[in-house]
Amino acid sequence: MKKIYLFPILAILFFTSCEKVIDIDVPSIEPKLIIDASFEVLFDENPVVTNTIVKLSLSADYFEETIPTVSNATVFLTNLSNDKTINFSESSILGNYKPSFDPNLTSEFLPEDNIEYELTVIYNNETYKGKATKVKGTKINSIIQGDDTLFSGDEIELEVIFTDDGSLENYYLFDFNNQQFVSIEDRYFNGSVYPFSFYLDREEVTLPSTRTVRLYGITKEYFTYFRILQNQSGQNSGGPFQAVPSSLLGNMINTTNEDNFPLGYFHISETDTLTIELVEKN
C-alpha cells in the first residue's frame, strides 16, 4: 500500500494549508531475474584487457528504492566451438560474478574473434541461457573540449572523433560517465572520420576535472534494445539496468520455464577509452 499526495492547483492557490491524502493500492509484481552481462574487450590496451562481469539482480515494484541483488546463482560461460567452460563466482560486490580462477582480478578471459559464447545462469532451479559473439569496435582518435552550446548556452561540449569502418554496418554505444549513454548507427557517415558532439550540463561539472569516454561496438539488435530501454527508463535513472519499467525482452532465455522470462542482455563489445582534461574557458 502506497500513499500518494495529490495537490489540486486551485487548492494550492486559495487554500495552501489544504491537502488530500488518497490511498492507492499498487499491485505487486513477481520479481524477474535481471541479467546485465556487458563484457568489455579493451582492444587498444597493451596487453589487451577484458572486463567480464555478470551482474544479477531482481526487479522490484515501481516505488521500491533498492534493487535486490542475487547471491546464490550458478554462472558459467561456454565456448561453443570447443565446449570449454569458464565458471564464474561472486566477487566482493554482491550480485557481481567474475571468472572464478582469480576473483581479485578483473578478468583473464579474452573472447576470441568469430567465436560464439553461451552464458548460462542457474537460479532458483531454473536455467537461463544467451549467446553472443564479440563485436568489432573502433579506436577513438581524439576528444576535444569544444566551444559550442545548446539551448541554455551553459553546456560543455565534448567532441569525440573516430573513424568508422566502411566495410561493415556499424552500431556504437557511447558512455560519457554518470549514467550518460548515447547509441548511434553509421547510416549517414559510413567509412568516414566522424566528429560526434555530446553536451554536459555545466552545473553538474566541477572544473577543472577529468572525464573518461568509452566507445563500444554493439550489434544492431542491442542497438535497438538499448534505444527502447533508454526511452522507457530515461537517461539519468541510475543506469540502463537499474530499473526496467516494462517487460522488455533481451537475448537471455529461460529454458526451464519460458513464462518466467528474464530481463537484461548479454553482449561482448570491443571497447576503446580516452580521457580528457576539462578546463574553464574564458
Image (cartoon, rainbow, N blue to C red):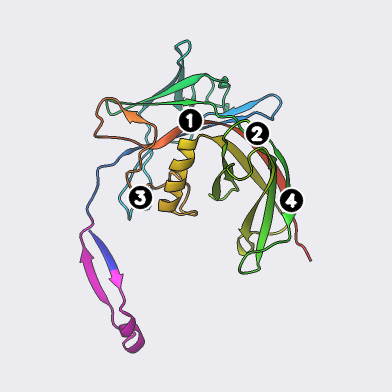
Q: Residue at x 29, y 82 (%)?
A: 18
Does residue 124 lie above or below 247 as drawn?
A: above
Q: Give coordinates of residue 164: x percent, y percent.
A: 66, 37
Pinpoint residue 274: horizontal percent, then vertical percent: 69, 41
Q: Tell me which numbered mark, 3 or 2, is placed earlier along the sequence.
A: 2
Q: Which residue is drawn at 37% across and 35% down?
A: 70
Query: The residue tagged with tag 3: helix, strand or loop?
Result: loop
* Circle 4 residues within 10 Å: few <14, some 14–19, many ≥20: some
Residue 91: give its label: 1
Q: Does the magenta stretch include residue 59?
A: no
Asked whether residue 17 is in view, the answer is no
Q: What residue type is labelled 1?
A: Ser
Q: Compare residues 72 and 84 and report the one nearer the observer.
A: 84
* Position of residue 11 in the picture relative to residue 171 (left or right): left
Frontmost residue, 43 versus 212: 43
Type of residue at label 2?
Asp
Query: Which one is earlier in the sequence, the residue at label 4 or at label 1?
Result: 1
Q: Give the range drawn in magenta.
A: 5-26
Q: What is the total number of numbered labels drawn onto the structure image? A: 4
Q: Quadrant of residue 260?
A: top left
Amino acid type of the residue tagged 3 in the rendering? Pro
Q: Mark number for residue 245?
A: 3
Mark closer to the observer (3, 1): 3
Q: Which residue, given by chain and number where applicable, does mark 2 sit on?
A: 165
Quick one: label 3, few (<14), some, or many (20+) residues within 10 Å? Answer: some
Lower position in the chain sequence, tag 4 or tag 3:
4
Q: Nearer the viewer, mark 1 or mark 2?
A: 2
Q: Mark 4 points at which residue?
A: 144
Q: Which of the marked residues, 2 or 4, is nearer the chain's N terminus?
A: 4
Closer to the camera in the image, 61 or 132: 132
Residue 185, placed above or below residue 88:
below
The residue under label 4 is which amino acid type? Answer: Ile
